[in-house]
Image (tube, grey):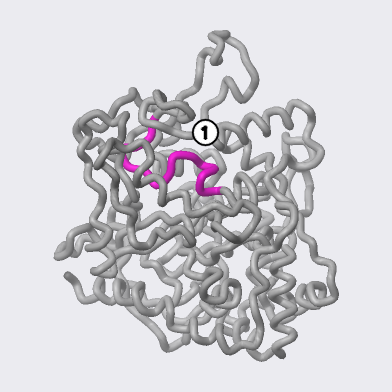
Amino acid sequence: MSTNLNRTRLLVAGLCAAYFGVATVQGQTDPGPRGGPSNAGGPAQSLSTDFTSFFFAARARFQLIQSVSGGIAGESGAGLGPTFNGNSCAACHAQPDVGGSSPHPTLGQVKKPNPQIAFASLDRLPGQNQIVPAFIQATGPVREARFIARSNGGDPTLDGTVHNLYTIAGRVDAGVCALAQPDFAQELAENNVVFRIPSAVFGLGLVENTADATLRANLRAIEAMAAPRGIHGVLNTDREGTVTRFGWKAQSTSLLAFASEHYNIEQGVSNEGSPNKRSDAPNCIFNPTPEDSTPVRNAAGSLTGTASEMSTDVVNFAVFMRLAAPPTPTTASQSELNGNALFSSIGCALCHSPTLTTASSPFPGQSGVMYHPYSDFALHHMGSNLADGIVQGAAGPDMFRTAPLWGVGQRVFFLHDGRAGPTNGGLVTAIMAHFTRGDQCSESEHFDSGQPFTFREHCGSEANEVIKSFNALTPSERQDILNFLRSL
């Protein structure tokens, strides 16, 4: 195996914790997920009656539970597998309401254990349970796993793709399919696994309807203030130059594309946007593809029906995300207001843009709307501390889209891989993980569309100067910022 690939694996295994100790000496505490109402998950304001009905029908489709061919009570969806991470969008997008992020058994509004634990035994024949990977825990985040290199050691070929936790082998509806799980224990031993966690989908119609020109202008507007701090955001784009903005590396252009990709990746359901199964293992394909296709008749056999009934699952998923209201902040106390001002004054807002404005929209109440995502939706170098070695479009191995902070007040897990949570400092750990010393560099191979790229060197994080400013605040001022973030 190449020396540089080993460096990447050691980087992922070791440097991710390089500054966690800093979080324990800052003199402030993450207040934890905010209680009370979820303040999210409902329809956007000003929707007409028809659009509101479509929203709630689409929300119900988002909660559809998949089985292999739809023959199990309570699991009417058809298309699960041959490999999968979950059997429903809402199973993983749960906290603080349908469309959110990872739940937790004792924290937040939902209070349920990681649903991925149950999938190892759900609908399995006697003696056919699969193994719950060590990185999936009842009190931990929902995760998808990617391998840096091809599996089973010794092969230096780069990978970078999602390897699902489970297969349908051994399920009551999977016939003689014998597709084995990946050997996650071996891959973990080789430091070959990196993770992604689900992010909330509330308010994304506003993001989708923000003009490319607006996002570019937003970056230009703060360039003079950002550049001296080492901040240089760049927008990811598709091959036609359209700005992509969804996903941890802003790899997806639209909500429809995002829904199509993830329906196939996470649940294994082929659809019109992603029409082929990711695995064609023998005896493991049971349905014609694409499994999610535009219906000619509704469930009652009529040629007409509601917009939801006559649309595919992925169109319904996109509509739910598009029409969902953004999270409602509760910023009111003097500490939270002070934290808001400090958030901007030390430079956090240079990447986490507080306000953007939508373009004209066909959806009621979404034209020319000023909204508050706390993101520029641009890519930034976060340094070797957060690098995952994966390239997606213009997003290099240490680059990530600025995570939107709206709704962060009710989130349990943070960062792209969920490493920051209630057992190790939460928001404090997430903030400190943004720092990577400028001399802490590494070379790494990386993966994009099946092809290895040349080595690149990534060193310090663009957030370093901001984190230094955060550390220079008094303990009470740092606490004010944390209190502000938990009010979002």
Q: x, y (%) of residue 65?
A: 48, 34
Badge 1 density bin: few <14, some 14–19, many ≥20, Cα 10 Å: many
Residue drawn at x 30%, y 26% as measured from the top left: 286
Q: How many marks?
A: 1
Q: Nearer the viewer, residue 91 or 229?
A: 91
Q: Is residue 461 left or right of residue 320?
A: left
Q: Is residue 202 above or below residue 76?
A: below
Residue 159 in the image: x percent, y percent?
Answer: 28, 57
Which residue is outermost to the front? 126
- In the rendered image, residue 162, in percent from the top left (x then y), is placed at 35, 52
Looking at the image, can residue 180 be seen? Answer: yes
Magenta highlight range: 79-93
| Quarter of image, res 446 | bottom left
Give the quadrant of residue 262: top left
Q: Is residue 198 above or below residue 71?
A: below
- Camera sees residue 216: no
Name above or below for residue 69 compared with residue 302. below
Residue drawn at x 65%, y 88% is 27
> Element under label 1?
loop
Determine if the magenta segment contains residue 365. no
Q: Residue at x 49, y 86 (%)?
A: 21
Q: Amino acid at mark 1?
A: Leu
For the stretch drawn in magenta, what is the main secondary structure? loop
Give the quadrant of the N terminus.
bottom left
Asked if residue 91 lies in the magenta stretch, the reply is yes
> Horizontal and vertical percent for residue 83?
32, 42
Quadrant of the rendering where the C terminus is positioned: bottom right
**Residue ID for mark 1:** 64
Q: Residue furthest left?
A: 154
Q: What residue appears at the point 41 percent right and 51 percent down from the top-left corner?
A: 117
| In this rendering, position of residue 408 left or right of residue 2 | right
